[in-house]
Image: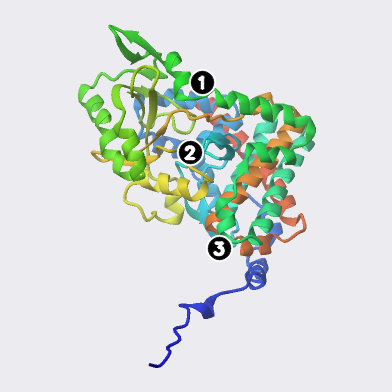
Amino acid sequence: MHEVNIPLQAEHNVQTLAERRAAGRALRNKAPRSSHAIWTAAADRPDPLSLLQEQNRTRLVHLVPLRYSRMAVSPFTFLRGAAIVMAHDLAATPVTGIHAQICGDAHLNNFGIYATPERNQVFDVNDFDETLPGPWEWDIKRLAASIVLGGRANSFPAAINKQAVLSCVQAYREHMWKYSEMRHIDVWYSRIDYENSLQFVHPTFRWYINKQRNKSRERSSLQVFPKLTTLIDGKHRFKDEPPLVAHLHDDELARQLRGMVETYQPTVQEDRQVLIGKYHCVDVAQKVVGVGSVGTRCYVLLLLGNDSNDPLLLQIKEAQASVLERHLGPGVYANHGQRVVCGQRLMQAASDLFLGWTRSGSTDYYLRQLRDMKLTVDIETLIPDGFIEYCRFCGWALARAHARSGDSAQISGYLGKSNTFDRAIATFAEIYADQTTRDHAALVAAHL
């Protein structure tokens, strides 16, 4: 018998780390790192308010005024609610052509603490409504602009805001380089664990980290259960606090929402399907969340296991088309809930135990726990040093998320070890923050 040697498939296409980095460096000819500093509003730039009004056509009409009122608080909150506006603006900026799974809405309040299924606490990106494969640069630019606006909202000097942006982008660049040198599987296992990350935190900020960690540990279904519910005729029901929490007047819709527990179950792991099956739904209500999401259909389900000491609160959130799709084309998933869930699983170090998706009629949804030791840092409580440190962690988290799906060697090769890209993004962030401030003023003038 003759021995047959079968070559590994596509072995000749495998590039070394050095070759991939060199390919990234070569992309500077296409998009110089300094070119990322440039942004000017095009002559035919759509009216930002018209883009927001376009979104309102698919939202609940009675909640639109609440959406505008939350966006009108400051230019920072305007940015949070105007992902569609910035997506249009970013589409005209330079890109390398390297794609990764991106958040699409990477601003300061879309990072935070949550618990892994093993009950460890991690810091990571935590919002994926707009996620899609796309240019990694778009996420870092949106994050940088939010840093300047967040700093301005705190009345920090321009020098502090610039330092915060530089700290964020430097962390992104340096960690991307480290991830490029790691085995792919080690990148996949990596996470910003709260316990271990304290060694990387400036000593003056550790007390705040510990405070936030302890606070997040208290945010669970069991903890929030008595705050959101009440006992009526021996039955547990959500407390009505309209328009933030309100029972539905449509009995058929309420029935459909209760049924989603069953229709979404096949989209979670089989062992978790067994766990969900041990709970039964006792109530459903509409709930308003966030800024950019206000007006989309969002509900909460109250499920009980053994008794009232065994509650499970699930959030049902509508998933509409990503604001990136008009610029990048549609994603591969027919269900936008599946797009959100799969994007989240790809970017996060670990995702919610109960994360899954379903569809009711023509509306796509995804489901997750309402609270599972989740906490978004209130940036208004941060002093300048803490703000800079927090932004650094956001840059680190974004690099880790992009490295899972993107080519970290090409990205790090493009970025290099100098601060050329960092400084360009800092300039862009200031310019775009000024534009957002003008857009915010237009919203306030039109609706107040």
Image spot of residue 284 (x, y percent): 31, 22
Point out the tag, 2 or 3, that comes first from the N-terminus.
3
Residue 288's place in the image compared with 201, above or below, is above
- Judging depth in this view, the residue of 288 and 113 nearest the camera is 113
Query: Nearer the N terminus, badge 1 or badge 3?
Result: 3
Question: In this figure, which residue is indicated by the disc labeled 1?
Answer: 448
Q: Secondary structure at mark 3?
A: loop
> Quick check: can you spot residue 47?
no
CB-based contact (under 8 Å), mark 1 and mark 3 = no
Please tell me how crowded label 3 is: few (under 14), some (14-19), or many (20+) other residues with Cα within 10 Å. some
Q: Residue at x 42, y 88 (%)?
A: 4
Query: Splitting the image into 4 quarters, where does residue 352 fall?
Result: top left
Q: Are marks 1 and 2 in contact (CB under 8 Å)?
A: no
389 left or right, relative to 243: right
Q: Closer to the camera: disc 2 or disc 3?
A: 2
- Residue type, label 1: Leu
Q: Which residue is mark 3?
A: 97
Measure the alpha-carbon separation of dots 2 and 3. Answer: 35 Å
Q: For the residue labelled by badge 2, is the local secondary structure a helix, a strand or a loop?
A: loop
* 133 or 179: nearer the viewer: 179
Identify residue for label 2: 117
In the image, which is nearer the foreground, mark 1 or mark 3? 3
The residue drawn where x is 71% and y is 37% is: 198
- Horizontally, is 82 left or right of 332 in the view? right
Return the residue nearer the eye: 57 or 313: 313
